[in-house]
Amino acid sequence: MKKITIAIDGFSSCGKSTMAKDLAREIGYIYIDSGAMYRAVTLFCIENGLFNGKEVNTERLKEEINHIRVSFLLDPTTGRPRTQLNGKDVEDRIRTMEVSSRVSIIAAIDFVREYLVAQQQEMGRTKGIVMDGRDIGTTVFPDAELKIFVTASAEIRAERRYKELQEKGEKANFDEILANVKERDHIDQTRAVSPLRRAEDALLLDNSQLTIAEQKAWLIEQFRKATEE
Ligand code: DC
């Protein structure tokens, strides 16, 4: 069967990563979480004092960017990739509210996007890849054979993130999370560089009312159609 490129884009916290990860495992493809790459750069900025409140020192970041290496290492017990920043495991640290509340600022910087998009395109050179993010179907892989644009209501997405944080034993406040989800939607959709938008040829998936099993069946069906053509 021919190998294809699968681009999954959509709003934050609508289950894109879980869906993309499961699909990749099922069909034996590589999975890349592009959001984790923006999160890792954000963590780097936090840990190296590049933030002053919500402002980032772009001059220093420009000097440092070529020294920021983001990669993924497969966890042998779970079979899932863990994000590495300059060779150190940062998978848990990039998922905190501290990073979530600043990542949109980093993702709106043009030279950060250029740097990460080039790496993402290199990762997908040999196809057989599922990548999720915001601009995968529009900018990273405009020729992807299968593009999916995922959405769900802001309340449902906030609820999911709330449960996720609670399960990890992190402090979580629903109203704060909902405000963060809405703020990120706004920044993601209105930023000047690569704003979040549905590619014309992307299939729309609103999963507000879908079970994981229903969603999975739908995805496999789209994959089957895309590979038989
Ligand atoms: O999917 P996520 O919540 O982990 O993404 C984190 C942030 O990175 C989010 O604010 C949007 C941004 N992002 C982006 O701009 N482009 C991508 N391809 C992936 C994520």
Image (cartoon, rainbow, N blue to C red):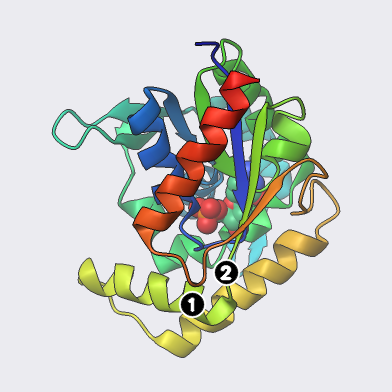
Q: Residue type at mark 2: give it.
A: Ala
Q: Which mark is residue 111?
A: none
Closer to the camera, 36 or 19?
19
Residue beneath the point at 37% across and 58% down: 212
Tag 1 secondary structure? helix
Residue lying at the far bottom of the rendered structure:
175
Crowd rating for badge 1 (residues with CA inside 10 Å; few <14, some 14–19, many 20+): some
Closer to the camera, 3 or 154?
3
Where residue 31 sits: x, y (%)?
44, 31
Closer to the camera, 124 or 52?
124
Residue 73 in view, yes or no: yes
| Ligand 1 closer than 8 Å to label 2 CB | no
| Image-based side of 73 in relation to 109, left or right | left
| Ligand 1 closer than 8 Å to label 1 CB | no
Q: Residue type at mark 1: give it.
A: Ile
Residue that mark 1 sits on: 156
Residue 49 in view, yes or no: no
- Mark 2 and mark 1 residues within 8 Å of each other at the beta carbon: yes
Residue beneath the point at 50% across and 38% down: 221
Q: Quadrant of the C terminus?
A: top right
Residue lying at the far left of the rendered structure:
77
Q: CA distance from mark 2 to mark 1?
A: 7 Å
Q: Compared to 96, does 145 lie above or below?
A: above
| Image-based side of 210 in relation to 122, left or right | left
Where residue 147 sits: x, y (%)?
66, 38
Where residue 207 sits: x, y (%)?
52, 64
Q: Compared to 170, does 50 lie above or below?
A: above
Residue that mark 2 sits on: 152
Residue beneath the point at 74% across and 54% down: 196
Crowd rating for badge 2 (residues with CA inside 10 Å; few <14, some 14–19, many 20+): some
